[in-house]
Image: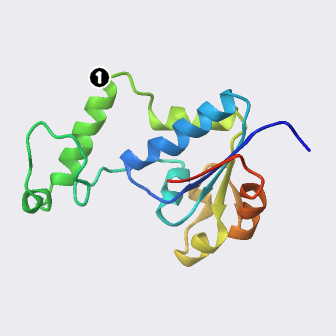
Amino acid sequence: MSDEKKLAIIATKGTLDWAYPPFILASTAAALGYETEIFFTFYGLQLLKKKLDLKVSPLGNPGMPMPMPVPVLVQALPGMQSMMTMMMKKKMASKGVADLTDLRDLCVEAEVKMVACQMTVDLFEMDTSDFISEVEYAGAASFFEFAGDADICLYI
C-alpha cells in the first residue's frame, strides 16, 4: 500500500468562475505530493478545450460580489453575461490571479491526470480534436477505481 495521498475531483461546471477551483486545488495538491485526478463531465468538459472561451453567468449566482446590487431581471438582459465576464476578468487581472490556461498547464506539468467522461463526450457529440492532447477518456467506473482509494474526493 502506497503512502502517497490521493485527491479525486469531479468537475461539472463550464463557466469561468467555476473553472478555477478544480485547477487551483489540483495544482496545489500535486505540489504537495498528492496523486491527483480530475474527472470532467457534462459542462466541465469545456475546461478541456484547447481554446478556452468561458463566460461568467450572473443568473443563479447570488453570491457573486457586485459593486452594487443588480436585480435578477436586469441580469437577464442581453449583454449582461459579457459585461460580467469582462468585469470578472478585469478583477482577476488586477489581483494577479493566474490565467486559467496557465493554471491548466501547471496541472499538466504536475502530472495531474485529466479524464474526460466518455459517455458525456458521446452524448454531446463533442469533437475530441477540440480538447488538449493530455486528456484521457474513460467512464465513471474508471474514475471510481481511483476515487475509491482517494484520501479526498471533491465535487465541483
Q: Residue at x 53, y 34 (%)?
A: 103
Image quadrant where residue 96 sits: top left
The residue at the far right in this view is 1
Residue 115 position, x and y percent, is 67, 56
Residue 52 left/right relative to 7: left
* Badge 1 density bin: few <14, some 14–19, many ≥20, Cα 10 Å: few
Image quadrant where residue 88 sits: top left
Image quadrant where residue 39 sits: bottom right
Q: Is residue 57 above or below residue 120?
A: above
Residue 53 position, x and y percent, is 39, 49
Q: Residue at x 8, y 46 (%)?
A: 69
Q: Quadrant of the N terminus?
A: top right
Q: Is residue 103 above or below residue 36?
A: above
Residue 85 position, x and y percent, is 26, 45
Q: Residue at x 68, y 33 (%)?
A: 30
Q: Identify the secondary structure beneath mark 1.
A: helix
The residue at the far bottom in this view is 123
Color encoding of the figure: rainbow
Q: Which residue is mark 1?
A: 94
In this orientation, does residue 90 appear?
yes
Residue 114 left/right relative to 58: right
Q: Residue at x 7, y 57 (%)?
A: 74
In this orientation, does residue 139 appear?
no
The amino acid pointed to by label 1 is Ser
Residue 156 left/right relative to 34: left
Please state which of residues 83 and 141 is positioned toward the viewer in this rendering.
141
Residue 68 left/right relative to 90: left
The mark total stands at 1
Residue 80 position, x and y percent, is 16, 53
